[in-house]
Amino acid sequence: MRRQLIALQFADRALAAPHPNHAVVIEHGNAIGGQPHIALEAIRAEAASLDYAPSFQLSHPAAFELANRLAALFPGDLNHVFFCNSGSEAVDTALKIALAYHRAKGAGSRMRLIGRERGYHGVGFGGISVGGIGANRRAFLTLPGVDHLPHTYSPEHTRFQRGQPAWGAHLADDLERIIALHGPETIAAVIVEPLAGSTGVLPPPIGYLERLREITKRHGILLIFDEVITAFGRLGPFTAAERFGIQPDIIACAKALSNGAVPMGAAIASSEVHDAILDATAQGIEFFHGYTYTAHPLAVAAALATLDTFVEEDLLVRSAGLESFWIEAIHSLEGAPHVVDVRTLGLVAGIELQPMPGAPGERSMKLFQACFDKGLLVRSGTDIIALSPPLIISKQQIEEVVGRLRDLLPTL
Ligand code: PLP
């Protein structure tokens, strides 16, 4: 059967999609749900008045309005927004801002970038280089001068833990080894997802991100959070940075920024980083970077409407209020056939399955297909199912999602 993908509607009703041909999106891309109502009118109105505006040397008023609203919402002095069109571009933009910052400060030798194993930062050359997924890197050239922290997943220590694992903060100390190996004067930035999403939902060990922040600061290295999944309330507060009480120097975001209605991403830099780059150039272009469709009017309209919805629907409060219900519901799948681990934080969950003998990834693909046939679009990795429900999901709908998974697991 061909299925039409739909987002959850605001009406607090059963998940049973309104039509048997529908599949409800329960993965990271359409972060809030509620479409088409959130942005439809705003996009339509904008398309009728301004369907394109260049963003080199100038921009249109709504782009400044959105940048100002985001600057007010992002924590601390993360006050400067560079718009782009995807999470991958947001990551590459953030990495280039980090390099430009050090050069502007007279520390042009700081060119190295440190990522993490099992990190996912999109598919640009920068993103796959700092990313830690072998399959995404192997077939392509990657940037020189990149090193990786170890990942933080250790099933024997963390299996079935709710929220952040108590074990693993010491893994951040590996950064000291990498810094000693290369020299701090060669390292520009460390980039991590605060919660590793695409490689199976790995919440950060308690104290881990704090240590990364302390070490990077001590060595003059920028800390970039890739919050393409976690920004905009996915973990309760507006950003994961606030959830963990850590101030990174740059945040990359996308997805919920425009709720997937029109592609959009952004890199948001601190005033310290921004001012250093701008102050270093007396005249002319300060930062040689930008996209033809940076701050595209339709994306800006979608993002402004999305931000309005956050306020009108009190989505951060809603997300935080649902976390414990979500976590308990998902963890009720412990003990279900083939489930070898369950990981949760905020409104995200990863369910790891026992691989089929000799066929890694096959079982999660079967679950993905079975879910789809039952009207649920989940994210499938290698024997991991990742779930990021729309923030407007209700408790009843959460129970239905979990109920469908419980029914399907024995059939795999
Ligand atoms: N960074 C993270 C953490 C992501 O989860 C993703 C996509 O899922 C990306 C970057 C890349 O975003 P995009 O697919 O919009 O390029």
Image (tube, helix red, strand yellow):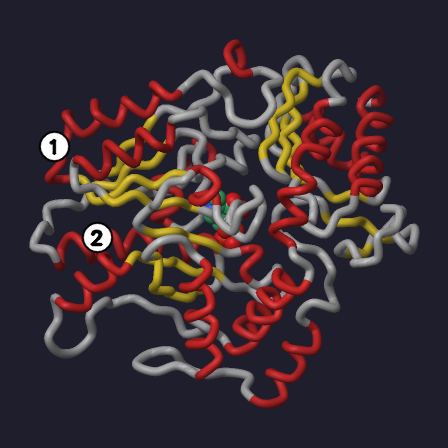
Q: Tag 1's secondary structure?
A: loop
Query: Which residue shows up at 73% across the image and 49% down it?
Result: 25
Kind of residue at disc 1: Gly
Horizontal side of residue 323 vs 129, given as left or right? right
Look at the image and tell me whether residue 5 can be seen. no
Report x, y in % for residue 147.
Answer: 27, 33
Q: Quadrant of residue 43?
A: bottom right
Q: Is residue 312 above or below residue 132?
A: below
Neighbour tally class for label 1: few under 14, some 14-19, many 20 plus, Cα within 10 Å: some
In this view, the residue in front, 115 or 38, is 38
Report x, y in % for residue 323.
Answer: 65, 37
Residue that protrudes farthest toward the top in the picture: 156
Residue linked to disc 2: 99
Distance in Å between CA atoms under marks 2 and 1: 16 Å
Residue linked to disc 1: 183
Q: Which mark is residue 142?
A: none
Q: Is residue 379 above or below residue 334?
A: below
Query: Which residue shows up at 62% across the image and 37% down it?
Result: 348
**Quadrant position of the C terminus in the picture:** top right
